[in-house]
Amino acid sequence: MDINNKVKEIKQSFRQMMDGATAQSMRDKGLNYHLNWGATLPRLREMADEIKLSVDTEDALYDLAIALWKENVRECKILATMLMPPEKMLSEVADIWMEQTPTVEVAEQAAFNLYQRLPFAAEKAFLWISLPDDLPQLCGYHILSRLFMRQQDLNERGINEFIDQALTALSSSSLSVQKAAFAALQHFADLSLMHRRLAESALRSHGFQL
């Protein structure tokens, strides 16, 4: 497969999906991309499934995802998160993608489509929630939410670190980070009665309620 030609073909197909109203709505909400065709997420998922059927190997999928991510186009970046094989992605590549993430939407899609499935997902989540920038924190809390929903627990040190960071995030200037941290606390509380009591006690001590 010629990666450059495949990327060109994919970009040309976005023109057929163009939704000016959706793209304008995104701009109105502050989601500014160099190029945004306004393609819906369900359509991008369908496209990702079609591409996976047409590409022979995971190595080729990896190369295609890397090439798509380099494009400063909303649809290319989201599609890259849908195509990247989680077991192939290196930790340092995940960090590079995180640094290059342009918007909340791409951050959320990357967390849901890819980062939560990485072999080192929890490790990356804890690193990112400790960073000062909003988008890594957002990704980190979304990853932890998904891990908790799959009944993945933390050791005592991890629990303490998570609760401390989440409580700090609830006072973030970013509403998206606040919501992601609170959602993670809710999913943590659903793990067991003990987890719920820990979360409720910590939140009460800071004037919050679960």
Image (cartoon, rainbow, N blue to C red):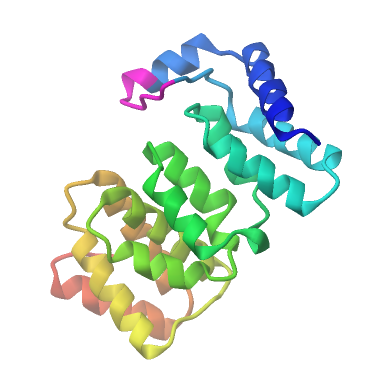
Q: Residue at x 58, y 49 (%)?
A: 113
Which quadrant of the figure has residue 13? top right
Pinpoint residue 118: horizontal percent, then vertical percent: 58, 64
- Residue 21 image point, x, y percent: 48, 11
- Near-viewer residue (8 or 153): 8
Residue 93 as seen in the image, left or right of residue 119: left
Q: Main secondary structure of the magenta part?
A: loop
Residue pictured at 22% horizontal, 67% vertical: 167
Q: Does the magenta stretch include residue 39?
A: no
Q: What's the magenta region? A: 27-34
**Magenta residue check for 28:** yes
Compared with 74, 60 (above or below) is: below
In the image, residue 210 sits, relative to residue 17, either above or below, namely: below
Q: Is residue 58 above or below residue 117?
A: above
Q: In which quarter of the image is the C terminus?
A: bottom left
| Residue 53 figure quarter | top right
- 158 sits to left or right of 165: right
Left/right of residue 145 with respect to residue 59 in the rendered view: left
Q: Position of residue 204 (x, y in %)?
A: 18, 72
